[in-house]
Image (cartoon, rainbow, N blue to C red):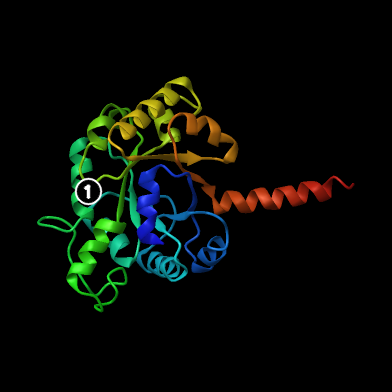
Amino acid sequence: MTTSFKTRMLSGEILVGTFMKTPAHEMIEVLALSRLDFICLDAEHAPFDRGRMDICLAMCRALKIPALVRVPAGTPVEILKALDSGATGIVVPHVNTVEKAQMVAQAARFGHGGRGYAGSTRWAGYATRPMTDVLQQSIDETIVIAQIEEPEGVEAAEAIAATDGIDGLFVGPADLAVCYGKTNPADPMVLEAIADTGKAAKAHDKAFMTFAAGAAAGPDLHKLGVTMFFVASEHAFMLRGANAEADALHALS
């Protein structure tokens, strides 16, 4: 399932996932029962230490649900932690130059100056598989997504998308709005930046994705080329469900 996920993503299939903010494996068990296509552990904005990320990724692989990790920084050490623990791929924030894209891609791929090889990790099968199989698994499975969230990233999107080893572009509408001095991610300037980034991704056959607060935003984003949606988070889902039930019962009075 994790191997085919990369093929599905690059084919332009509509994929729906969510950011997970709670570093607890029980939450993985619940979300795996849903019809979501993937989960993204948000190690940038939520308290995922190495141990809690590790157990959540173990649960994802056991339940065969593709798991991405939004790493806190695009450094080789953070990328290695996520991939060795079992992540299907990584989302790297603040990729705003082609040089940064090249560094991130190299850190996630095996080769001279790239990802350190260890056959004894969970991802590699705990030393039960030959090196040829493990190296092929990286080619078939591992996904590297560059997050475009500054004006410089939008301007460099064409070159970033063309970078070998980058599989997709994730546009961050909230961060772009802030960078442009706007207070609404739906501002025309932000939408134009999203559209430009989407064109860059399409030109180089890379996946294009973004955050969506809910399904209602889907049609407009899809028109801009988005095919992979990171919908809200389990926190938002819990609040929506709780408020809907509370509001319905409060209305009885």
Q: Which residue is at a point 31% across and 29% down the rendered structure image?
A: 154
Q: Residue 133: where, in percent of width, then height?
A: 23, 68
Using the image as rendered, state which of residue 223 and residue 51 is in the foreground. 223
User: Above or below — where is 48 with respect to 130?
Assistant: above
Furthest toward the top, the residue is 188
Q: In screen coordinates, is 193 left or right of 16?
A: left
Q: Residue 227: where, in percent of width, then height?
A: 45, 40
Query: Residue 251, located in which quarter of the rendered image?
Result: top right
Residue 70 seen in render: no
Q: Image quadrant for the N terminus?
A: bottom left
Label 1: which secondary element: helix
Q: Which residue is at a point 71% across and 48% down the rendered structure image?
A: 243
Using the image as rendered, state which of residue 206 and residue 182 is in the foreground. 206
Q: Residue 114: where, in percent of width, then height?
A: 15, 56
Q: Which residue is at a point 25% across and 60% down the rendered structure image?
A: 138
Check disc 1 and give the amino acid type. Answer: Ala
Q: In screen coordinates, is 154 left or right of 41?
A: left
Q: Which residue is mark 1?
A: 105
Q: In screen coordinates, is 53 left or right of 235?
A: left
Q: Which residue is at a point 32% across and 34% down the rendered structure image?
A: 201
User: Above or below — where is 165 with respect to 77?
Assistant: above
Dot 1, crowdedness within 10 Å: few (<14), some or many (≥20)? many
